[in-house]
Amino acid sequence: MGRIQVAVLGATGMIGQRFAQMLEDHPRFEIEGLYASERSEGRRLAEALRVRDHVYREETLETRIRAMDLDAVAANCRIAFSGLPSDLAGPTETALAAKGVAVFSNAGAHRMDDRVPIVVPEANPEHMEAVRDQPSYSAGGFIVTNANCSTTGAVMPLKAIAGVYPLKRVFISTYQALSGAGYPGVPSLDAVGNVVPYIGGEEEKMESELGKILGGYTDGGFAPAGPRVVASCARVPVVDGHVESLAIEADADMDAETVREALRGFRGEPQRLGLHSAPDAPIIVREEDDRPQPVLDALAGTPWRARGMACTVGRVRGGGDIVKLFLLSHNTLRGGAGGSVLNAELADAMGLLR
Amino acid sequence: MGRIQVAVLGATGMIGQRFAQMLEDHPRFEIEGLYASERSEGRRLAEALRVRDHVYREETLETRIRAMDLDAVAANCRIAFSGLPSDLAGPTETALAAKGVAVFSNAGAHRMDDRVPIVVPEANPEHMEAVRDQPSYSAGGFIVTNANCSTTGAVMPLKAIAGVYPLKRVFISTYQALSGAGYPGVPSLDAVGNVVPYIGGEEEKMESELGKILGGYTDGGFAPAGPRVVASCARVPVVDGHVESLAIEADADMDAETVREALRGFRGEPQRLGLHSAPDAPIIVREEDDRPQPVLDALAGTPWRARGMACTVGRVRGGGDIVKLFLLSHNTLRGGAGGSVLNAELADAMGLLR
Amino acid sequence: MGRIQVAVLGATGMIGQRFAQMLEDHPRFEIEGLYASERSEGRRLAEALRVRDHVYREETLETRIRAMDLDAVAANCRIAFSGLPSDLAGPTETALAAKGVAVFSNAGAHRMDDRVPIVVPEANPEHMEAVRDQPSYSAGGFIVTNANCSTTGAVMPLKAIAGVYPLKRVFISTYQALSGAGYPGVPSLDAVGNVVPYIGGEEEKMESELGKILGGYTDGGFAPAGPRVVASCARVPVVDGHVESLAIEADADMDAETVREALRGFRGEPQRLGLHSAPDAPIIVREEDDRPQPVLDALAGTPWRARGMACTVGRVRGGGDIVKLFLLSHNTLRGGAGGSVLNAELADAMGLLR
Amino acid sequence: MGRIQVAVLGATGMIGQRFAQMLEDHPRFEIEGLYASERSEGRRLAEALRVRDHVYREETLETRIRAMDLDAVAANCRIAFSGLPSDLAGPTETALAAKGVAVFSNAGAHRMDDRVPIVVPEANPEHMEAVRDQPSYSAGGFIVTNANCSTTGAVMPLKAIAGVYPLKRVFISTYQALSGAGYPGVPSLDAVGNVVPYIGGEEEKMESELGKILGGYTDGGFAPAGPRVVASCARVPVVDGHVESLAIEADADMDAETVREALRGFRGEPQRLGLHSAPDAPIIVREEDDRPQPVLDALAGTPWRARGMACTVGRVRGGGDIVKLFLLSHNTLRGGAGGSVLNAELADAMGLLR
């Protein structure tokens, strides 16, 4: 059986480059083309490359960027992975779905749409079924989104803890990496030796997306659930890896060790199905005092192909009505391209790509 | 009237250097000597200097460090400003107070002692009276501490907001500067491009000191009060200036604009008394989306001699039971040497140094 | 006698902000207006501010930016300080000079023009006379440029050493600060933890400007002189202050101590004339092993108003035909706005502004 | 045939950790033990780990550090790889060689000793024969060193260019990474936003080691040769990868393209022999304007196991008597542990380890 042909949209961006990384040696998906704006047409991927930790194959680096052509994509590809900027993503993804393409998107444009799920496969794989209710589904096309990068980091630990305690509220402050702003993104004079306590729209996304993901989907509608989220988002001079400080409030008398066990033991559908890009353990719990750290833990995840796909949690402490912890999630892998690739693998396993 | 002779203890450290800065042209206090460990004896202050933003006078730079000699300090100085490491500060400060010296300390050693106040003059000037109950007071000696650097940042805004709403809990996550760890302090391989989500003892200090400061002092005892504090502390690659993310919970229906007004209008005893190192406005409220930032706001404070003594607050938002904000306070000026100098000015104005 | 009215062009840029700083309390020059592109019109200076180490007066911060209007500038100002980008600077400066305005420019556009001098007042004050040969001079207008920021750092030390040894060649490698690229300038993903070994046109500027400055001016023409320059330029993650590594070759048997003495004793016309922005000692020689460093020495220069105007030299070593040293010069003060302000002060003292 | 048992000395340091990385899956060498100071005894390698870009196998991470015991090392190991600090390396390495162990050292202690070669296998493989003249050789023991990290970067390009032009002098300025100073190494307050223009002993090493490597070995003595080296060394806030700026002077009329071709075509004994850790192309020549950059090129080298073993050269420019270029070499891989592992592979291929 041949591999499924896929397009990468927004291929020269930070997320696009990570899509190329995760799809380089994929057993089920094959890159048909890297698509970007007309301005980038004809450039080699190598010329855009800012990823510091992955060594691409020579032929990947030499791949020529193509200008976006929706008909060509629809004609040649079953799947489009979208790393497009949000304004462009909206109409492009809708059009592709209408043409019968399964779109797995990192963009925020459609995340809060009815019938478009935000899927984090370890947390809400059942939401994937919502695509059957999308109007384009009869033609084979649909849209699935992954969560915003900072939301993603918090989803799995909250899901795990919600399994043992009834969560009430969660107070989150983020320490977000520069790669999250794309390239050129944050000017260096704003980054070196500085903290910028603002990321446009980020807090609102965290406060709305978590509820949609942790809630239910019935009769064509998403019913938000889960703890109330109070988020504060800031940018720090880190290259990759969002750190988040959480204070979790429950209607219960919590115990830190019970929380740690719930985190350590957490497994989801990707692990059960053995999805290609799924980490063996989706949450890694560190016992050291000073972890997680971006430079040491951003790429956490085994096996090798799932590096950057695990969430690292540390300093689980407190107890009673409030437990505190720090977590770290790779913002352009698990919180970006990797999240969408895992979604596509789940959809494939669920038979949605036939 | 001659100026009061003062000693700086721990003069080669980050806090010691800031004491020298703030005392260089002080109208009431005159540096009798800069004291440090025997190892530093005879070195010029210039050789230890890491302060990046202050231009010292040539004669200050040439000042020779003396080895600590408690009898000499007691014989020559009415005041000792202590920037000593905590283990050394404990016995040294006790001994100096017993010898009749008024000790204004940045060290944590005595902060939670009975009868030793932690004073932030805009918040709890009345606690200064506690020194009269210290056993050494009859001989003129006593100990006053300033709050830990991260506690300091939160005190004034919380005091201001507590004036308009009954506070219940405050969730704080910090983004703390490297200078807070002293020199050599944090290794560069742990700092460049990284976040370290741990500062030993810091969270415990924030959770206990705030209550002591915001509480009352009667009959020789401090009665903690104020909101419950839930603190998470992390180090970021910033040179000076601690950023803090606060989610403030009240038993009230809060309004962000009311909070902003309370912050803007906040004045305390130092402003009323016109203390030399007091900022005209102790809290500066920024309206921009992306402030405060360490590189732009750490040195906030007017007049010039009070730079680094104001707390900058921004992004006051939310409402109802929870208001969120970011604040920034200079950790070695307002949160270090400057805090103790202001305490000494207050004690002087209260007649405690006669 | 009233102060001379001056315009600042390109006022929202990194150099423009430094012009505002240096002119805030100037005894001879008064800011008539801050001019920038139409896009910035009406904004307050405060909104553009990226300068980290200067505390502007409140009224300076509130100054409204005006859209560039050459007729208005010519009607109201005797002087225009130009921090314009090079492409815009070319025609704008020519037009202003034609209208009788004395233009002191930081831009590269006219630096290599005939009859337009590049003046570093301590090195070649006599070149200022070239303005009398400019066609617009009869109407009172002319153009004077300061050297490129990396050239500036090397000029004074080379001039000083050329006074004691016949220089043959100088090999320069630079470690240039981010502020030199303006704002937004270098993307943070290219800056954090990185070196970029390329700055467009910079090496060519260093190799041509030094010869023009160190050469003679006669009969309307500049005759390059001085050592052959071999320059390599790189960007490092420093905010302000260009470091340069020099290997100086002479047709002589050099001695490091003689070089140090020549540097220490160096004084020029600005010191002789007591120009307002001139540092007491234009070159500061450090004896420590590990200086100069940007964070400690970029703002070198006394008195206070001349901070950032001195060049710091350290590690003078070697001997025989080659002496090595490191130097540091503030790229937006001495190597930018400060250089042009000092040029204007020199022109004023020479009677060219009547 | 079983693998050769090897010890890693100084295993918890930055170089020691890289030894563990390069030896993890080595076909010829097997780690018998990781040795460090008594203070580290019993700790797992994982607790010391600062390497950011390598994902160690779980069993490697769990390996317990042993306290140094020379008799145990001699009894169990044919080879000792030394990442010891220089003062400790001197006597330890001598003692081990005397006990019959082949020592491959990254330390500077013995580099300039008679009969101890500094080997960069692509440049001077024939120097390896010098070990036969060491007194301990009869017992099977000897010492081979790799060059200092900053020297290493320059060796291969200079060797390559010396093949086409007679080199006279080379002026080098370095931009060296923080990992070169070990851990804790450079304090973060000296690193963030700064350049430190001094690395103790580094310039002297570059100026003496290059001549020894490029010279000849006959009759028990090394005769220095090659161009005169004029070196200036500085530390920049980069994690891994030393950048060097070279101005190369020849007694010839050089052409930049000829230099590029010589660099591109350069191959040495490791490539001819197909040594395990040898990069296919030891020098990679980049054509882009702005390369090499540490974050993009430090890990250059194919195949995967040789990443960090290639030297990247860019901006080859100039001509006539002087050609300029920038180069980048990984300081703890090629310029550290990797250099010594490659030396051991060469010695093995030459039959010196029987």
Image (spheres, coloured by chain):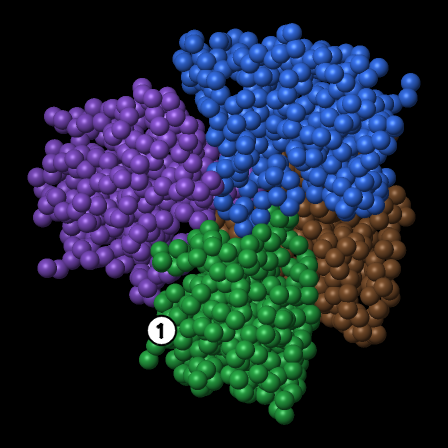
Chain colours: A purple, B blue, C brown, D green
| Relative image position of residue C157 (x, y in whole percent) | 79, 59
Within 10 Å of the Cα at label 1, are there few (<14), some (14-19), or many (20+) other Cα atoms? few
| Relative image position of residue B354 (x, y in whole percent) | 84, 15
Which residue lies under the disc numbered 1? D27
> Label 1: chain?
D
**Element under label 1?**
loop
Q: Amino acid at mark 1?
A: Pro
Residue found at x 44% / y 54%: D44
- Quarter of the figure with residue C202: bottom right
Horizontal side, residue D133 vs residue C271: left or right: left
Query: Who is closer to the viewer here, D205 or C211?
Result: D205
Residue found at x 69% / y 38%: B14
Horizontal side, residue A328 vs residue A60: left or right: right
- Quarter of the figure with residue A226: top left
Q: How many marks?
A: 1
| Relative image position of residue A222 (x, y in whole percent) | 20, 26
Q: Is residue B173 visible?
A: yes
- Quarter of the figure with residue B220: top right
Residue found at x 32% / y 45%: A310
Horizontal side, residue A339 vs residue C313: left or right: left
Q: Is residue B265 visible?
A: no
Above-or-below relation of B212 to C116: above
| Relative image position of residue A49 (x, y in whole percent) | 40, 56
Query: Who is closer to the viewer here, D27 or D35?
Result: D35
Above-or-below relation of B335 to C254: above
Horizontal side, residue C292 vs residue B310: left or right: right
Above-or-below relation of A143 to D164: above
Q: Quadrant of the N terminus of chain A?
A: bottom left
Residue found at x 47% / y 41%: A290
Query: Who is closer to the viewer here, B267 or A111?
Result: B267
For the view shown, which residue lies furthest in the bottom direction?
A: D219
